[in-house]
């Protein structure tokens, strides 16, 4: 029974999402809130951890893989590898800390560099800690202007109140899905190993 | 004299503590006034002083004054002038000579005598007594001090008794009468004796006169005596007369009593007859009803009930001893018994017929609707069997027997009568009822469960069949061969809209499991909720119809006839009486529903067989139903049965848990492929998710928590066991990946009793990630690593860092040699290989490659810096550096990133 299930589980569409941003902006907090509906008050610097969850995306059951990283690495190159593994990115800064906002540009540049062969990388700029309005340092307009410049969406979230937490993950997944779909069409029949596998599975099911 | 003496003693001497012993009334020689007294005194206190005191009587009034006192010792001579002649004069020689004239010679002598005695007793001094007759100066004079002087009218001093005032008066008055008394005592005495003689004479004369009177009295007494005799004679004759009257009265009252007795006897007799006629007479109508009353129409039943009650009353009349000897009573009793027997027979037969009829009716047309039952006769509209069956299979319901119950309850009163009068017949009827109902229910229940089983098995058969899962279910459909296969398929196709067949392509097997389980849960719930009212209704009916309710007071009677017809539990005080009745109900219920427990158990067994996780549903469901049933009536048949079944279900649940644990223990890992996430780890996740869903808000949370603890322990142990045995995949990887998975499972389910396990899992995951990274990193720079480990060992042994290079094995040449072996190209190749190896070790599902690689890059850089530091410190100024820079390394990382 269980063996069967494992195969089936992996046959679900999988979207790989990477949390990017300076330390302390709330990447882990957002991830944990999305995964487990909980908010951790104390700050524990992550090196990296991986999460997986089954969700229903517009009626379709899919899996999301979230890689939550530190963002404080001494050498940017260390990030190259996991940036490459990602399909979509949540570029997180804290609205209470302008440095974290400035840092987003560098992160974005690195992502684009690492994924140079892809014409468009699914990415959302996330201004977190929106519940701390009184400590805001980065205005929404300022952030939105930058996002527009990059022609990506800007969303303000709070990992504490859960505001927009689902939205950023789901919106990102939609972008990832859209990109995959256009790629499939483009490549016209040439399918990734992952897709082939799931198709095979579907045949069995029918 | 005495009175004066007394007055003096009282007034003058006693206050002075002196005692007056002798007194003499004197006057100074030559003077006529005799108003002086010379007194001889002694002091009462010792030493006794003897004095001669001169007291003068005041001229006016009756009081005395002490005038002068001499000590006796100062007295030298007493001169009486003349010892023989009657001469009242005498001299006392103190400091000078005092001459006195006493009022009488006797007084004078007495005084002198006293002086002499006083001298003798207290002074014994030489005192001259001149011209004193020697007789006066003698001790021998009786009662010296108080010797009687002049005719002895003076008492002894100490015994003197004062005359009380009255005596004084008497004497005074007598003396007044006889003025001369004092002066002429003899005359006085003579006068007195003369008077006495006169009185004596008078006395004798009066005595003599009374004798005549006495004689007269005697005569009167004689006369009175004869009168008394006369009266006595009369009384005697009266008494005789009274005696005869009394005898007559006795006779009269005797005869009165007899009359009274015969009257009360007659009254009593009348009462008895009235009593017997009142209570032992059964009306014609009643007799008729009992003999041939219609037992099927409501009116007839009513009449029979009334008649039976009247009969019972007649039969239960408390007859007094002897009544039964009366012929009429005997006859009447015989009649009653006959009536009773006839009616009991009639009633029993009728009810028997009703049972049989109902039974046949129900078993012929199992699914018929109540109104068929209502049209009491035999003819029934043609219902073709297959149709009924289809209906039957479509909805999982049990036929209701409320019409039957309603119908039979009309006879409840008669049953009560029967119970009270013909116990054996009543018991026979109960047996028959139970027999029939047992058969009826057995069939109904069997059919019902068959349908439940088909539904249960059918669902899993059609779907699972394609996966070749749950092979056992195929066999189960075999047992229902008698039933229309079409029914099964049709029922399934109806359901398919909502769930399985059409959109199954998109569903995973676990979804199918979920769908199956939900369906199973529904079926099971329906089975229970059908059985519940059935049992309660039957139990209620039995207790009402067979009168096995607790004997309740009217107030509680309302309870019983509650709208829902459920017998409510009673206060404990009434429990005792009704225990045997309750037992009766339970016995009957046990018999009637004997198949339920069996069927339930077999259904449970089937559910368990189809999918052992079904036990979770069943545990929760049955627990819930047990609870509600217990709330209604803890002693009800349903509660007990469900309680028994619950035990089975709990056992299945435990078996399910221990089965999972056994599976974990038996798990075999292929030696060729990577281990990945162990099957039982995902199995646990699946179980926990399901269990959380099922047990949400359930009463049996405690059972589940216990199961969790057991399971998680087994999971931990067996992950470790597999990790130790694993060959292809490193132990650390097995541990890391599986505990990462367990941690994430527990984090998302938030099972509070497994919180420590959640933390443990995280701890284990981090630990093994760390040790995997470190162990793996030795490999790309193995010899360098070795060399520097040696260097560090030396330093640790106490070699100074700058001197390490003097050690043969660690001199600069050696270092250069080792470093040479790792040119940039080699390192890159080593890292490439490491990345590939890690990729091969790790499984896709847990997606830890990036996490591990991230850590490895970090660690690699850290090592590089560490080596560099050691070179700088141990080989200072040697100018030796690594063959590759950090920058080179970062480029290698980037290129590895690009190549995947
Ligand atoms: N008030 C508030 N605090 C937040 C929010 N998100 C994160 N934090 C806090 O900020 C600190 C850093 O969060 P963390 O998620 O560890 O940052 P990371 O380094 O980006 O993973 C923690 O103490 C969090 O509790 C938020 O939306 N609102
Ligand atoms: Mg973090």
Image (tube, rainbow, N blue to C red):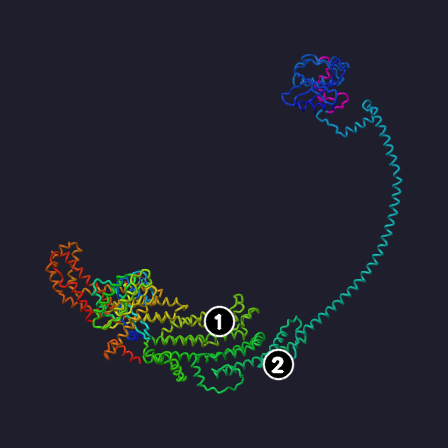
Question: Which image quadrant: the C terminus of chain B?
Answer: bottom left
Please state the quadrant of the image where ligand 1 appears: bottom left
Note whether B488 is above or below B813 in the view shown. Answer: below
Q: Secondary structure at mark 1?
A: loop
Q: Answer whether residue B136 is magenta in the image.
A: yes
| A185 and B536: which is toward the camera | A185
- Identify residue for label 1: B636
Q: Are marks 2 and 1 in contact (CB under 8 Å)?
A: no
Note whether B877 is above or below A20 in the view shown. Answer: above
How crowded is the residue under tag 1: few (<14 C-alpha within 10 Å), some, or many (20+)? many
Q: Which residues are magenta?
A: B130-155
The numbered mark, 2 or 1, whose residue comes first in the sequence reads 2
- C-alpha distance separating marks 2 and 1: 39 Å
From the top left corner, tell me how far across and down residue A186 is, in percent.
24, 78
Note whether B260 is above or below A197 in the view shown. Answer: above
Q: Secondary structure at mark 2?
A: helix
- 2 or 1: mark nearer the eye: 1
From the top left corner, tell me how far across and down residue B736 is, in percent.
26, 66
- Residue B722 visible, this orientation: no
Disc number placed over residue B291 in the picture, else none: 2
Q: Main secondary structure of the magenta part?
A: loop
From the top left corner, tell me how far across and down residue B781 is, in percent.
16, 64
Note whether B637 is above or below B87 in the view shown. Answer: below
Q: Is residue B212 left or right of residue A74?
A: right
For residue B881, what is the image quadrant? bottom left
For residue A136, what is the image quadrant? bottom left
């Amino acid at each position: 029974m269980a063996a069967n299930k494992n195969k089936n589980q992996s046959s679900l569409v999988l979207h790989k999402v990477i949390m990017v941003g300076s330390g302390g902006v709330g990447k882990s907090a957002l991830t944990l809130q999305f995964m487990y509906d909980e908010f951790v008050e104390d700050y524990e610097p992550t090196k990296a951890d991986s999460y997986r969850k089954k969700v229903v995306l517009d009626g379709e059951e899919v899996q999301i893989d979230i890689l939550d990283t530190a963002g404080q690495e001494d050498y940017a190159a260390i990030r190259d590898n996991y940036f490459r593994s990602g399909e979509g990115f949540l570029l997180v800064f804290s609205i209470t800390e302008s440095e974290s906002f400035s840092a987003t540009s560098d992160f974005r540049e690195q992502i684009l560099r690492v994924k140079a062969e892809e014409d468009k990388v699914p990415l959302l700029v996330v201004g977190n800690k929106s519940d701390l309005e009184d400590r805001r340092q980065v205005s929404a307009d300022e952030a939105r202007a930058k996002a527009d410049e990059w022609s990506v969406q800007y969303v303000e979230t709070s990992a504490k109140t859960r505001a927009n937490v689902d939205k950023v993950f789901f919106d990102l997944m939609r972008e990832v899905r859209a990109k995959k779909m256009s790629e499939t069409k483009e490549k016209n029949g040439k399918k990734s190993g992952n897709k082939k596998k799931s198709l095979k599975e579907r045949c069995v099911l029918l | 004299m005495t009175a004066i003496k007394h007055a003096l003693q009282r007034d003058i001497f006693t206050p002075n503590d002196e005692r007056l012993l002798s007194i003499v009334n004197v006057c100074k020689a030559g003077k006529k006034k005799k108003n002086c007294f010379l007194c001889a005194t002694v002091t009462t206190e010792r030493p006794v002083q003897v004095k001669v005191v001169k007291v003068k009587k005041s001229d006016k009034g009756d009081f005395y004054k002490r005038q002068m006192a001499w000590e006796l010792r100062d007295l030298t001579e007493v001169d009486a002038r003349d010892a023989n002649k009657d001469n009242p004069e005498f001299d006392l020689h103190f400091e000078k000579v005092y001459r006195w004239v006493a009022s009488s010679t006797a007084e004078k002598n007495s005084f002198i005598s006293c002086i002499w005695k006083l001298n003798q007793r207290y002074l014994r001094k030489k005192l001259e007594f001149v011209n004193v007759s020697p007789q006066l100066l003698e001790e021998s004079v009786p009662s010296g001090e108080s010797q009687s002087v002049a005719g002895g009218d003076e008492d002894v001093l100490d015994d003197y008794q004062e005359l009380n005032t009255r005596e004084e008066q008497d004497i005074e008055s007598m003396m007044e009468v006889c003025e001369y008394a004092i002066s002429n005592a003899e005359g006085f005495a003579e006068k007195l004796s003369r008077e006495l003689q006169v009185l004596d004479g008078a006395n004798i004369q009066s005595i003599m006169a009374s004798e005549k009177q006495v004689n007269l009295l005697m005569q009167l007494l004689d006369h009175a005596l004869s009168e008394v005799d006369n009266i006595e004679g009369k009384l005697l004759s009266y008494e005789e007369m009274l005696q005869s009257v009394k005898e007559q009265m006795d006779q009269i009252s005797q005869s009165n009593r007899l009359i009274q007795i015969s009257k009360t006897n007659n009254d009593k007799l009348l009462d008895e007859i009235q009593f017997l006629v009142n209570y032992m007479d059964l009306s014609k109508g009643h007799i008729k009803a009992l003999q041939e009353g219609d037992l099927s129409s409501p009116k007839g039943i009513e009449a029979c009930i009334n008649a039976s009650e009247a009969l019972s009353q007649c039969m239960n009349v408390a007859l007094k001893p002897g009544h039964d000897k009366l012929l009429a009573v005997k006859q009447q009793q015989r009649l009653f018994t006959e009536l009773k027997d006839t009616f009991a027979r009639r009633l029993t037969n009728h009810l028997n017929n009703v049972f049989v009829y109902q039974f046949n009716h129900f078993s012929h047309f199992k699914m018929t609707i109540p109104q068929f039952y209502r049209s009491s006769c035999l003819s029934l509209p043609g219902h073709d069997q297959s149709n009924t069956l289809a209906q039957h299979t479509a909805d999982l319901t049990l036929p209701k027997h409320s019409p039957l119950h309603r119908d039979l309850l009309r006879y409840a009163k008669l049953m009560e009568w029967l119970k009270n009068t013909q116990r054996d017949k009543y018991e026979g009827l109960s047996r028959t009822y139970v027999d029939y109902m047992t058969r009826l229910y057995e069939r109904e229940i069997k059919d019902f469960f068959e349908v439940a089983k088909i539904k249960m098995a059918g669902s899993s058969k059609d779907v699972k069949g394609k996966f070749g899962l749950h092979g056992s279910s195929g066999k189960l459909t075999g047992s229902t061969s008698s039933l229309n296969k079409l029914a099964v398929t049709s029922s399934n196709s109806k359901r398919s809209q909502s769930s399985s067949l059409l959109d199954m392509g998109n569903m995973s097997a676990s979804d199918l499991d979920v769908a199956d389980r939900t369906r199973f849960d529904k079926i099971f719930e329906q089975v229970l909720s059908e059985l519940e009212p059935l049992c309660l209704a039957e139990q209620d009916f039995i207790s009402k119809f067979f009168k096995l309710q607790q004997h309740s007071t009217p107030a509680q009677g309302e309870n019983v006839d509650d709208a829902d017809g459920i017998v409510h539990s009673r206060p404990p005080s009434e429990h005792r009486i009704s225990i045997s009745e309750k037992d009766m109900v339970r016995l009957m219920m046990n018999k009637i529903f004997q198949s339920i427990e069996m069927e339930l158990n077999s259904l449970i067994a089937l559910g368990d067989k189809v999918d052992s996780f079904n036990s979770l549903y069943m545990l929760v469901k049955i627990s819930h139903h047990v609870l509600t049933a217990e709330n209604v009536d803890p002693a009800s048949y349903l509660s007990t049965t469900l309680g028994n079944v619950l035990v089975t279900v709990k056992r299945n649940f435990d078996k399910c848990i221990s089965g999972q644990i056994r599976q974990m223990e038996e798990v075999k890992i292929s030696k060729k492929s990577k281990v990945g996430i162990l099957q039982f780890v995902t199995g646990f996740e699946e179980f926990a998710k399901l269990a959380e869903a099922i047990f949400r808000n359930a009463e049996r949370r405690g059972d589940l928590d216990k199961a969790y603890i057991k399971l998680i322990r087994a999971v931990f142990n067996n992950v470790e066991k597999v990790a130790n045995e694993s060959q292809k995949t490193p132990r650390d990887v097995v541990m890391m990946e599986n505990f990462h998975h367990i941690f994430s499972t527990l984090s998302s389910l938030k099972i509070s009793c497994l919180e420590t396990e959640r933390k443990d899992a995280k701890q284990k995951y981090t630990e093994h990630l760390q040790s995997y990274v470190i162990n793996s990193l030795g490999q790309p720079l193995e010899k360098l690593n070795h060399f520097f480990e040696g260097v560090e060992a030396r330093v640790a042994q106490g070699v100074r860092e700058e001197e390490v290079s003097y050690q043969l094995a660690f001199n600069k040449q050696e270092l250069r040699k080792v470093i040479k072996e790792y040119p940039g190209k080699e390192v890159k190749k080593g890292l490439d290989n490491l990345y590939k190896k890690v990729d091969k070790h790790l499984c896709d599902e847990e997606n830890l490659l990036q996490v591990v690689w991230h850590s490895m890059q970090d660690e690699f850089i850290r090592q590089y810096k560490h080596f560099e530091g050691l070179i700088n410190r141990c080989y200072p100024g040697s100018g030796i550096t690594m063959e590759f820079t950090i920058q080179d390394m970062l480029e290698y990382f980037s290129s590895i990133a690009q190549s995947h």
